[in-house]
Image (spheres, helix red, strand yellow):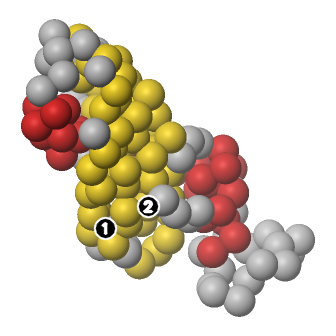
Amino acid sequence: MTRQLTVNTRRQGLHEITAEVAAVVRAAGATDGLCTVMVQHTSASLIIQENADPSARHDLEAWLHRLVPEDDPLYTHVAEGPDDMPSHLKAALTATTLSIPIVEGRLGLGRWQGIYLWEHRHHGSARQVLVHISA
């Protein structure tokens, strides 16, 4: 079973989508299997990260901004704005696909783990995310 989710992001940063992905798992009725999540964009990514303390997400965002600055004079892909090439680099450094076991009908995430869509552009967008369940 495959479902497409639309995640509306309003800004750059981490947007938790755990509940939406878990709903697809429940709808599939799978008790054991694999959930594959894929973002269909080149300027956004996916990560599994702590969902208890927001400071962890803030620190991740700040660290990646330092690692991939917007004002690098070596960028040639600049037609769509100063955040475009950095967004592609950030997506390349993180992940566009995640695989999560389904155990007893639930995502096999740890206690403090959540699934996040990481919007790398300044202004949000309607991001398409595929969720595939293999049972």
Mark 1 and mark 2 in contact (Cβ < 8 Å)?
yes
- Give residue 47's mark: none
| Mark nearer the N terminus (2 vs 1) | 1
Can the viewer see residue 60?
Answer: no
* Residue situated in front as seen by the camera: 13 or 47: 47
Residue 114, position as x, y percentages in the image:
28, 32
Q: Residues within 10 Å of mark 1 (few under 14, many from 20)?
A: some
Can the viewer see residue 111?
Answer: yes
- Give residue 119's mark: 2
Residue 69 figure quarter: bottom right
Which quadrant, please, contains the N terminus?
A: top left
**What residue is rendered at 63% in x and 86% in y?**
80
Q: Residues within 10 Å of mark 2 (few under 14, many from 20)?
A: many
Residue 63, position as x, y percentages in the image:
57, 45
- Give residue 9's mark: 1
Please give left or right for residue 133 compared with residue 72 in the image. left
